[in-house]
Structures are given as structure tokens and as C-alpha cells.
Image (cartoon, rainbow, N blue to C red):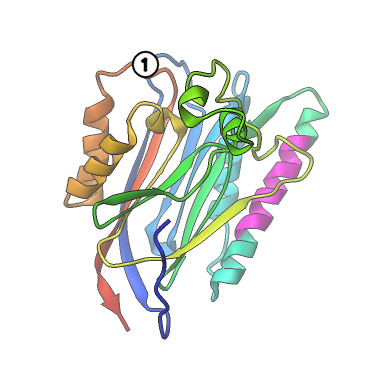
Amino acid sequence: MPANNPRPAPRVVYLTSWGWTLTGNCREENQDSFLNWPDRLLWAVADGVGGGDDGAMASQLMIRRLSAIPPADTQARNVLAIKEAASEVNEALWRRRSKGNLCSTTLTVLAVQNDQAVCLWAGDSRCYLSRQGSLYQCSKDHTFRQSQIDRGALTPAEASRMIKGNVITRAVGGQSTLELDEATFTIEPKDRLLLCTDGLSNLLSPVALSETLARGATARSISRRFQELIKNLPQRDNITQITMLVSNPYHN
């Protein structure tokens, strides 16, 4: 993550965004869901896990609950509301588990208040920030592969060859209680952001993600460019993305 310079007071930024979700060419159903709510400065992607329709239900339930969050006058209250929503859904999905319905969902949320952004997540759906030609991954995967890297058991190159390295170690509904990781940063003019499920990040390299985010003129054109890049690739998973652009300079 880039270093944030101290500011005398928060300033308002304006963001435009565009999102889509695809079933892919190897799946019969789409278990991804997303929230694209620029007027509320709230965005989220969720990747459901579970047999049949359970995964789709889990991700949809999470996104519906987030869409009911009222506006907050501070970022702290914004974050609290997001955590409460995620915890409520976690409890609901965990209760289903006791009845034999094993379902959960990843969740990555981006909320902006003035020029302050917060990313909260559980699972391996990601948040990226593109700034001045550099790409930063704001989230950190909750996967078995990443856990092996963190403990020093494997190098990133070694871990990339793991057969079951993408097993999720944290998700909404995956445990009796939920903890969301959190990253905060200041939005700068000309920043570009991307939320996506692993269906996209597994298909495109960080270089491809960075170049695509940096070149487009609008959130819509960048989103369409992502579709063009993956249309001839083997899409073994559902794919979801939301692209966000800081659309004009700061205003007091």
C-alpha cells in the first residue's frame, strides 16, 4: 500500500463505477454477487461457496444485507454498520450449517467517506488500487496457499503450484464468528480501484490488471476491456468485477 501523507482536513472525492458478473464457460450457475452503489460510495463483491444454489444464496444474502445499510456521518460508523451486516449474515449461514446446508461466501467491501477509503474482507475476493502507474493489492487472501506463504513454509512461487492452495480459510458463514480484515487509505486524484472475485484475478496477471486499469478513460470502458481480455480464455469459475475511477478533483 502507498504511504498516506497527512492532510489538514478530509476532502470530498467523486467516483464513477461500472460492474458486471459472468457465469463463465465451465459453470452452470453463477454464485457471485456484487454491489455497485456509487451514490452511497459503497461497493462489494461476494463469491458464494456451496453445492446447488446454496453458494448463490449466500452471496446474494450478503449483498442484499449490505444494500440495506443506511448512510453514515462518519467512516467509523460506516465500518461498524458493514461489520454488523456481515456478522448477521454469518450467523444466518452458520445456522443453516447445523441443518446440513454447508454454504458460505467471500466478501470484499470498499466504503468511501470524504477522501478516506476502507476495505474490509474475508476470503480471496480482492481489492486493488492503481495509483500513478503502480498497482497495489489492498486485500490479502484468506487461503491455504497464503497461509503457507505467511508462515514461511513455502515461497510464493512454490505456493503457486499447490493443487489445493485456493482452499478458503475464512469466509462469511465459514465459522461460528466472523472477523473481517481491514485496510484504510486516502483517496488521491486520478486513483483507480478494482474489486473482483478470484475468477478474474486467477485469469489475469497483475501486469494485465495494472495496464488495463491505467489505460481506460472511464470505468465503463475499463470494465469492457476486462471482458475483452478474458472472452477467449478458459473461464473455469464465475467472474465478477467493479471498476472505480476518481472522476474529478477534490472539492472543499
- The percent position of residue 129, horizontal first and vertical second, equals 36, 52
Residue at 79% from the left image edge and 36% from the top image edge: 95
Residue at 20% from the left image edge and 52% from the top image edge: 218
Q: Is residue 68 left or right of residue 214?
A: right
Q: Is residue 202 above or below residue 75?
A: above
Q: Is residue 13 left or right of residue 185?
A: left
Residue 43 drawn in magenta? no
- The percent position of residue 118, horizontal first and vertical second, equals 50, 60
Q: In the image, what residue type sits under mark 1?
A: Asn
Residue at the spot of label 1: 25
Q: Is residue 242 above or below residue 105?
A: below
Q: How many neighbours does mark 1 have within 10 angstroms: few (below 14), some (14-19), or many (20 or more)?
A: some
Front residue (pair 66, 239): 239
Find the magenta span and give its range: 82-94
Figure disc tally = 1
Q: Quadrant of the C terminus?
A: bottom left
Picture quadrant of residue 2: bottom left
Front residue (pair 80, 192): 192
Q: Is residue 127 left or right of residue 162?
A: left
Q: Secondary structure at mark 1?
A: loop
Q: Quadrant of the N terminus?
A: bottom left
Residue at 57% from the left image edge and 60% from the top image edge: 69
- The percent position of residue 11, horizontal first and vertical second, equals 37, 78
Front residue (pair 205, 171): 205
Front residue (pair 97, 153): 153
Picture quadrant of residue 102: top right
Q: Is residue 237 above or below residue 146?
A: above
Predominant SS of the magenta segment: helix
Residue 87 drawn in magenta? yes
Residue at 70% from the left image edge and 34% from the top image edge: 174
